[in-house]
């Protein structure tokens, strides 16, 4: 996924240096127009970032679904292989049973032919030729022996014939049973094939949706790039205009803004944003603190912003004069008003988690001539 290269902080730098007291703003229409244009630019960037955030969330969901589909497809392939193997085994068993039935049929036909031959030799005109047995017998006892032997031979042939019929019937029954199992195995194989086809189609649709999502992200990134280019141009213009409008209140940064809380959860450094996933400069420090605890002005100056401020949520910006400003973001509520003069250590709001935030904390920035600087050296 292409990382979002958001540079709205550049615009914030502009606003930190350009938002002036109402009287001064009225005296400079060109500056006011530039400020309004910068604010609109920021609004559009913030809107695009929101859409990008939604797309990245959806992208993660799609990727999770693709992983699940790939796992299910792998299992479906294994299941299909098992079902195909079972079907092939059943088919071979049926073929073997058919061959056995055919062999038994040939054996039965051979025995029937042998019995017919003996019957023709033993019978004439439908009855036994006893005269032939008598004339061929030397004695009466020999006659009985010959007759008994002839009957036994015929009985044996008849027994073998009946036995062959029974065996054939058993083989046919076994073949029918195997054919039923083969049909069941074939049905299971078809179901496994259908399941795999469905999963393959689902994966294709999910991949197409993911590609469309990425195209949408690319398009929004192009829009963001254009807005960022405009932001740089506006920043230069506003900085030049602001140089003619200096704040009347000057104060140095001297007071830690969160009394009783000094743990830095995210320093002034390159980092990956916890919500957007953007890898960029963290333009301030995040100070972990209890929800609704006090936020103090880091120095004396004039409040030039006291409102909702996009990703910062509820925010206050103080102009300390000489191009120095401080920003306090993610407040639960604000107690300072725009245009108000504040002194170092004065309560200006309360800790919260508004805007782009993962939990209660203060995002604290210091800027010099619009450029962010590490706040920590001010408190060493």
Image (cartoon, rainbow, N blue to C red):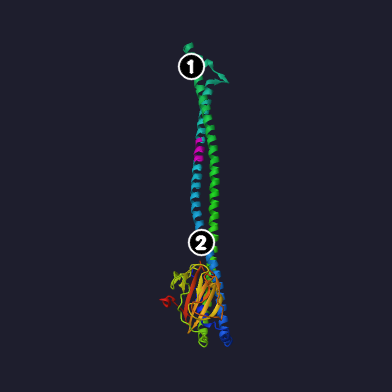
Q: Is residue 108 above or below residue 24?
A: above
User: Label 2, on which residue?
Assistant: 63
**Looking at this view, is 24 or 163 the one in front?**
24
Instruction: Residue 336 in the image: state x and y as whole percent.
Output: 55, 77
Q: Residues within 10 Å of mark 2 (few under 14, many from 20)?
A: some
Q: Residue at x 51, y 63 (%)?
A: 60
Q: Main secondary structure of the magenta part?
A: helix
What residue sits 51% from the left and 56% below the top?
Answer: 68
Is residue 318 found inside the magenta-colored segment of the image?
Answer: no
**Where does the magenta region start and end?**
93-100
* Residue furthest top as drawn: 140
Quarter of the image where the C terminus is located? bottom left
Q: Secondary structure at mark 2?
A: helix
Q: Nearer the viewer, residue 254 or 155?
A: 254
Residue 182 picture location, percent across and down: 53, 42
**378 vs 106: above or below:** below
> Are discs 2 and 1 less than 8 Å apart at CB?
no
Q: For label 1, count other residues whose C-alpha is less than 10 Å away and answer few (under 14), some (14-19) or many (20+).
A: some
SS category of the residue bearing label 1: helix
Compared to residue 21, the image places residue 294 above or below, namely above
Q: Give the label, 2 or 1, closer to the camera.
A: 2
| Residue 93 marker | none
329 or 156: nearer the eye? 329
Mark 2 vs mark 1, CA separation in Å: 92 Å
Task: Name the quadrant containing residue 19.
Answer: bottom right
Disc nearer the start of the sequence (2/1)? 2
- Residue found at the far left of this picture: 380
The residue indicated by pointer 1 is: 146
């Amino acid at each position: 996924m292409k990382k979002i290269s958001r540079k709205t902080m550049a615009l914030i730098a502009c606003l930190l240096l350009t938002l002036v007291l109402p009287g001064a703003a009225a005296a400079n229409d060109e500056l006011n127009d530039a400020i309004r244009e910068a604010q609109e630019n920021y609004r559009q960037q913030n809107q695009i970032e929101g859409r990008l955030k939604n797309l990245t969330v959806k992208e993660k969901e799609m990727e999770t679904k693709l992983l699940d589909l790939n796992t299910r497809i792998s299992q479906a392939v294994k299941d299909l292989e098992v079902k195909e193997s079972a079907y092939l085994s059943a088919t071979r068993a049926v073929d073997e049973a058919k061959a056995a039935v055919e062999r038994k049929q040939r054996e039965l036909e051979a025995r029937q032919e042998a019995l017919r031959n003996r019957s023709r030799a033993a019978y004439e005109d439908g009855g036994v030729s006893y005269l032939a047995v008598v004339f061929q017998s030397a004695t009466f006892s020999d006659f009985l022996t010959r007759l008994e032997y002839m009957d036994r031979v015929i009985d044996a042939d008849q027994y073998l014939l009946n036995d062959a019929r029974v065996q054939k019937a058993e083989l046919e029954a076994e073949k029918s049973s195997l054919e039923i199992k083969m049909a069941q195995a074939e049905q299971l194989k078809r179901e496994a094939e259908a399941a795999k086809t469905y999963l393959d189609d689902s994966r294709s649709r999910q991949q197409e949706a993911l590609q469309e999502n990425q195209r949408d992200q690319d398009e929004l990134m192009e829009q963001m790039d254009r807005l960022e280019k405009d932001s740089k141009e506006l920043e230069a213009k506003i900085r030049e205009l602001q140089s003619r409008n200096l704040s009347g209140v000057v104060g140095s940064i001297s007071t830690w803004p969160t009394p009783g809380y000094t743990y830095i959860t995210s320093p002034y450094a390159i980092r990956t944003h916890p919500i957007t996933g953007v890898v960029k400069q963290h333009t301030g420090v995040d100070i972990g603190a209890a929800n609704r605890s006090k936020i103090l002005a880091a120095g004396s100056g004039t409040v030039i912003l006291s409102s909702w401020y996009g990703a910062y949520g509820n925010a206050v910006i103080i102009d300390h004069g000489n191009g120095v400003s401080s920003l306090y973001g993610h407040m639960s509520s604000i107690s300072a008003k725009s245009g108000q003069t504040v002194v170092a250590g004065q309560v200006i709001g309360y800790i919260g988690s508004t805007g782009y935030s993962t939990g209660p904390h203060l995002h604290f920035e210091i800027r010099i001539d619009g450029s962010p600087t590490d706040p920590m050296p001010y408190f060493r």
